[in-house]
Structure formats: structure tokens, C-alpha cells
Image (cartoon, helix red, strand yellow):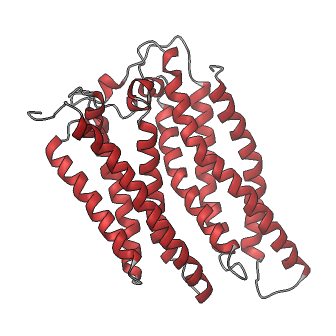
Amino acid sequence: MILHPGIIALLTGALIEVALLIYSSYIGLVIIMRWNANSSTEEQLSLERKTYLVSTIMSFVLAFSILSTLLFIYTVDGMHRLFTGAMCATGSLNANPVGWYALYMKISIFFLASIWIAVNYIDQRTEDSPLVKKKFILLLCITPFLFSDIYLQFRYFLGLKPNIITSCCGSLFSKEGGGMAGGLSGLPTHPMEYIFFSSIFIYVFIACVSLFSSKGFIKYLTGLMAIVLFIISLASIISFISLYFYEIPTHHCPFDILQGHYNYIGYPLYISLFGGTVFGILTGVGEGLKKSRLLTIQINNLQRKWTITSIALITIFALICIYPMIFSSFTLEGY
């Protein structure tokens, strides 16, 4: 294991998460089995107090899990100097391939945790807490992901050796690299540009329509299109967007843009993409929770805020992507 401030912070936070998760999962299971909103027994009153406590604890745990995704990327990118052959986060992750699984797990948890926090927010602000059982069932579904994340983090960081020679993005994110990374790098540039900008236009259009429509179908479509746009955007970053920042037609790495050489532009790029996506997804998720008049009123107000926030963040993401295409002398004509 390498003693690095980021690693120590992540692993310490993970140990605290384990303790809180075990307690919260146990209480959550009890609440699912015994919760009765129509009862006024001593047991029900005790469960109501525990519900608030556990919900608060898990909100902080899941908020830390969301922030730890950013800290993980920052730490992995900063460690590349310790490995021979590494130039960015790709080299650090290749130094122990378990790191890739940890990254994928963290991305999954980012979205799941955001959804749970939103559901909990709605529940705590609605009379009679109508979503108690649903949010704790969701919590128990998320818990295995959180334990897997903690396990993978420990496997990854404890398995790192400073004397290892690793490969980096030049071999992985290239047309000859093979696998998914090689396939994404080899996607034809001009068709991908068309697909990318078309998907942004379609998403923003659907999201704008949902602001003025009460039809549930449009809300669900907004959430679904947010997921589609997210996948297309990640593929586009590797396929052609990153090339405009590097001004090198063969360099497809999605991590180098996080470095100071490129003014850390990757951070606002990814934060706006992930944020815009999650708020778009919440618009669709919220529609599925409208089971009563009080919930409908609460969720309608939130959906409008979520949709506007999503449109704003996706617009920022698009502007960041477009900027080097317009103001750089670099062009992909002929590639």
C-alpha cells in the first residue's frame, strides 16, 4: 500500500461507512417489517424516531459516497507520478486493474445515492412520511453496492506497489488497443459529432417540453433520455471531444483533461455532465413516486427545479465541449 493523503482519507471514510451501514441496514430491515403509519403504539413511535435518525445518518453516508467519487478520481490521477510508465489516472488504474472495477462501482453509486437522497428529501417533507418503506427497501438494495465499493477500494489501494511498471492511455485508448476503450477510440469522428449534438438538442427539447407538460410520459422520457445522453457523451469524450483539448488527433484519453496542462477543464466538464444527468434522471424517478395528492404537489415543485438545473448543467457541458472546437486552430478535417 502507498501512503497517500487521498488514500488514507478514502479508506478511513470507508471504515466509518461500514460501521454506519451495518447499523442502518439492521434498523432499515426492522422498519420494513414492522412499520405501520396508522398505528400509535410505543413501538411505532420508537420506529419513527429511528427512521429520522437512520435517514440522517444515511444521507451523510451517501453524500460522502458521492463526494468520494470525485476524491477517488483526483487521488488516482495524482498518484500517476509514482508509477513508471504512467502519465495520468489510466496508468494508476492499470497498476492494479481492480481500480477500474472500483471506478465503475463508484459511478454506479453516484447515481444510486443521488436517487436515495432525493427520495428521502421528498419523504421527510411530506406529511405522514409516505415513502418510508420504499426508501428503506431502496437503501437495502444500495447497501451491497456500497459494501462492494469499500471492498474494491481496499483491494485496489492495498494492491498498489510503487515499483511496478504500468501501461498508460497511449496503449489503452487507441484504435489498436482493443476492448471497449479501443472500440470507443475508433468510433468515426464526424458521425459521432452529429449523434452527440443531436442528442443534446433532443434532450434539451424534451426537458423544456416537460416543464410545460403535466403528462407523466414526458417526465419518464426526460429521465430515459438523460441516461442515453450520458452514455453518448462519455463515448463522444473519448471519440472526439478530448482531441480538441489535446490538439492531437490520436490522443483519446478521458483523464488527461483533468490535469493542470489543460487547466483542469475535465473537472467542470465531468461535474456538469454527471450533475445534469442525475437531475434529469430524478425528473423521471419522481414521476414514479406520485402515489398521493400530497406527494404529487411536493414532487411537481421539485421536478421543475430538477429539470431546470439539468438543462442548465447540460448546457454548460455542451458549451465546454464546443469552446475548443470554435476557438482552437485545431481541426479534425481529414481524420
Q: Nearer the viewer, residue 202 or 115?
A: 202
* Residue 79 pos. (x, y %): 53, 22
Image coords of residue 152 (percent x, y): 57, 37
Visible residue check, residue 325: yes
Q: Is residue 188 visible?
A: no
Q: Is residue 251 above or below residue 61?
A: above
Image quarter hosting the C terminus: top left
**Which residue is painted at 53% across and 32% down in the image?**
74
* Horizontal side of residue 118 vs 15, given as left or right: left
Q: Choose between 154 and 270: the one closer to the eye.
A: 270
x then y, percent, for residue 109 = 55, 51
Residue pictured at 45% horizontal, 28% vertical:
89
Residue at image point 48% right, 24% down: 92
Residue projecting furthest to the left:
334
Nearest to the observer: residue 154 or residue 245:
245
Q: Eyeballing the image, is 148 above or below 279?
A: above
The quadrant where residue 198 appears: bottom left
Q: Position of residue 68 (x, y in %)?
A: 60, 41
| Left-right relation of 175 to 296 | left
- Total labels: the figure holds 0
User: Does residue 140 sit above or below 321 in this rendering?
Assistant: below
Q: Residue 165 sits in which quadrant?
A: top left
Residue at far right of view: 42
- Which image quadrant is residue 34 in? bottom right
Closer to us: 282 or 150? 282
Locate the N terminus and report the quarter of the image it occupies: top right
